[in-house]
Amino acid sequence: MDEFLTADKGFYTTEIKRSQFIGKLKKVNSEDEAKSFVAEVKKEHSMATHNCYAYIVFDEGSERVRYSDDGEPQGTAGLPILNVLKNKGFYNVAVVVTRYFGGVKLGAGGLVRAYSDACAGACQNAKITRCIECTLYGVDFSYENYKKFSVFKMPEYSALQSIEYGTAVSVVFAVRKQDGPAFVEKFENFFNKRQPIAPLTDTFCEFEEIK
């Protein structure tokens, strides 16, 4: 997979037969971050009847998927939340749906719909961006070459990741992986092969904001 959608800062609340459902969504970059987010929400809503969750994370090259019904009947909460995330194509996202029981049982089908809708609402209200697999490149510019670089046209889906000023200007670029070889060739030709550039690592970078 060379690209995926991610989302952040999603919130949704609804009431169904006197039970309150609160969906919270957060972008996470590791399984540890996902677990911390779940723990934070559970602490915030420690008096709630249930805090059900799901997350999908790329962590150290592996896909980590977890979900929990947190005491609801098996398959009625965590898995429906996870299915919403999968259907939307989201990764590096964690969602917790909190329920304050209102005294009226919803039945298995009602619970699936309630947890799915709360997750979908949080997704709908979130900031959604496209993540693309990129190669990071490091360059140490002289100040003269850095000034010259200001007129160099970077390819689509590329971005400046960091810059440090010292005896040289140290810059790290992110370039969509599939465009890497063409970018390096263009860069080297621009500087008549007198400006070293080195690939550092591959990673996923956020680019285009969907909403």
Image (tube, helix red, strand yellow):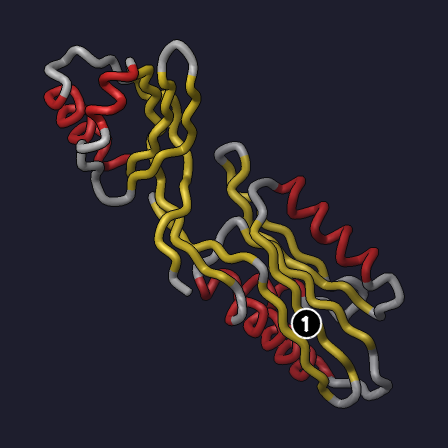
Residue at figure coordinates x 81%, y 65% from the top left: 71
Badge 1 density bin: few <14, some 14–19, many ≥20, Cα 10 Å:
many
Splitting the image into 4 quarters, where does residue 173 fall?
A: top left
* Residue 198 locus on image (x, y percent): 30, 17
Secondary structure type for disc 1: loop
- Tell me the kind of residue under disc 1: Thr
* Residue 13 locus on image (x, y percent): 67, 76
Quadrant where the C terminus sits is: bottom left
Residue that mark 1 sits on: 76
Towards the viewer: 78 or 178:
178
User: For the view shown, which residue lies furthest in the right direction?
Assistant: 47
Splitting the image into 4 quarters, where does residue 78 fall?
A: bottom right
Query: Where 38 sits versus 79, above or below?
Result: above
Splitting the image into 4 quarters, where does residue 14 fall?
A: bottom right
Q: Is residue 75 visible in this depiction of the protein?
A: no
* Residue 65 locus on image (x, y percent): 58, 49
Towards the viewer: 188 or 122:
188
Q: Is residue 126 left or right of residue 197?
A: right
Residue at figure coordinates x 49%, y 61% from the top left: 127
Q: Is residue 166 left or right of residue 147?
A: right
Residue at figure coordinates x 59%, y 40% from the top left: 30
Query: Where 87 sits versus 201, above or below?
Result: below
Q: Is residue 119 left or right of residue 202?
A: right
